[in-house]
Amino acid sequence: MKKSTDEIMNILNKNKNIEDFLSKNTDEFIYDGLDEYLAKLIKEKNLDKSTVIKDSCIDTVYAYQIFSGQRKNPSRNKILQIALAMGLDLDETRRLLKIGCVGDLYVRITRDSIIIHSINSGLSVMECNELLYELGEDLLQ
C-alpha cells in the first residue's frame, strides 16, 4: 500500500470508469481473506508453510485451517503468532491484523509495546512470550 486511504478515495471519486480505477490500483486493496494474504506472503518471502506453522506455536490442525481459509476469524493472538513466525515487519503485521479484522497494535498499551518491540527485534513467538511473561503481561498463547 503506497497511497493513503484519502488519496485512494479522491482517485475513485474523480474516476469515471471503475474497471480502470480497479486495474490501476490493485496494490492498494485489502485482500478478500486472511488466507489469501498469508499465501501471498508465504510466496513473496519464500517461506515454508509447515515451518511457519511449527514456529507459530499454534496447534497444527488449527493453523492449517487458518491458512486454508477454513477458520475465518482467528484471534488477534493467533494472527500475531503467525506474524512473528513469518518474521513480518511492523507494517506487514499491522496489515495482517487489519485483514484479519482484529485490533491494531497500539503503542500506548504496554502489552502491545512489548509485541511491537518483539516484531522490530525479530523475536520468535517463544522469545516474545518470554518477554511478555517477564514483564507481567498475558502471553500470546
Image: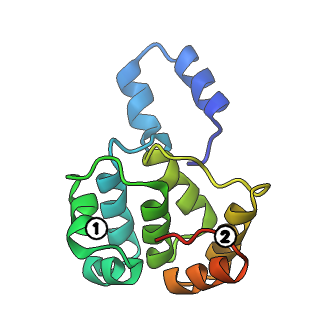
Where residue 31 appears, as percent x and y from the top left, is 38, 45
Closest to the camera, between mark 2 and mark 1, is 2
Q: Earlier in the sequence, mark 2 or mark 1?
A: 1
Q: In the current view of this chain or complex, which residue is farthest to the right? A: 108
Which residue is found at the position 40% from the left and 26% from the top?
20
Where residue 93 appears, as percent x and y from the top left, is 54, 61
Where residue 58 appears, as percent x and y from the top left, is 34, 73
- Local SS, label 1: helix
Taking depth in this image into account, of 116 and 59 the one nearest to the observer is 59
Q: What kind of colouring is applied to the model shown? A: rainbow
Which residue is found at the position 44% from the left and 75% from the top?
86
Q: Which residue is mark 1?
A: 63
Taking depth in this image into account, of 3 and 137 the one nearest to the observer is 137
- Local SS, label 2: loop
Numbered badge on residue 137? 2
Q: Amino acid at mark 1?
A: Ala
Question: In this image, 7 relative to 35: left or right?
Answer: right
Q: Is residue 98 above or below residue 37?
A: above
